[in-house]
Image: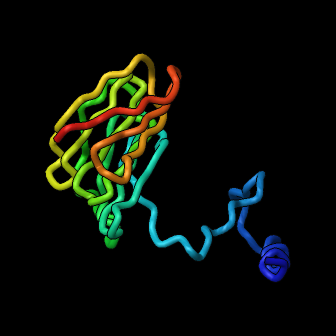
Amino acid sequence: MKELSDLCQAFEQDIPRPYLASWYPLPDLPDPALIRTLSGHTSMVNGCAISPIGDYIVSASWDSMLKVWDAHTGEELRTLRGHSSEVWGCAISPAGDFIVSASWDTTLKVWDAHTGACLSTLYVNGPLTACAFHPDGMHIVAAGEGGVYFLRWVR
């Protein structure tokens, strides 16, 4: 970085005026481990999960939606709509066939991971911020302003 800074200072006097210069240091390049950035939500992303076999990723956002992404290409596969407020958390069932989402609208929604269809809406007594599937795939735990909820989900 020092070499580049010295080079820039050396050529600065030769740059035609006027020119733009940054008042603040420019950000560093992303970490070399970064494979890709998934873009498509219109608001802050609060949660994410990756399928058990690693073929798809789910993201939860304040735009009230979830997005399902191909983990290998980064392509957006589908958008899950149905919550009426921010979605704070998401999880994928142990078999990878269902997605659960936790929303500030006081609901958990269970989705078919392959079609995006909403299969169930479960209501609790307060806004939700997190969720997870039990290893048996038939129970869900969620957390939020009202506490921690343990629910049985019947397919």
In this rendering, position of residue 18 left or right of residue 48: right
Q: Position of residue 74 (x, y in %)?
A: 34, 65
Q: Splitting the image into 4 quarters, where does residue 103 fall?
A: top left
2 vs 37: above or below: below
Q: Quadrant of the N terminus?
A: bottom right
Q: Position of residue 147 (x, y in %)?
A: 52, 25
In this rendering, position of residue 84 left or right of residue 14: left
Q: Nearer the viewer, residue 114 or 155?
A: 155
| Residue in view at x 59 percent, y 76 percent | 32
In this rendering, position of residue 101 left or right of residue 15: left
Q: Nearer the viewer, residue 141 or 46?
A: 141
| Residue in view at x 37 percent, y 47 percent | 133
Q: Splitting the image into 4 quarters, where does residue 149 fall?
A: top left
Q: Position of residue 27 (x, y in %)?
A: 68, 61
Q: Quadrant of the C terminus?
A: top left
Q: Nearer the viewer, residue 71 or 101?
A: 101
Figure colour scheme: rainbow
| Residue in view at x 77 percent, y 53 percent | 24
Number of marks drawn: 0
| Residue in view at x 73 percent, y 57 percent | 21
Residue closest to the far top: 125
46 vs 150: above or below: below
In this rendering, position of residue 11 left or right of residue 151: right
Q: Position of residue 154 (x, y in %)?
A: 20, 38
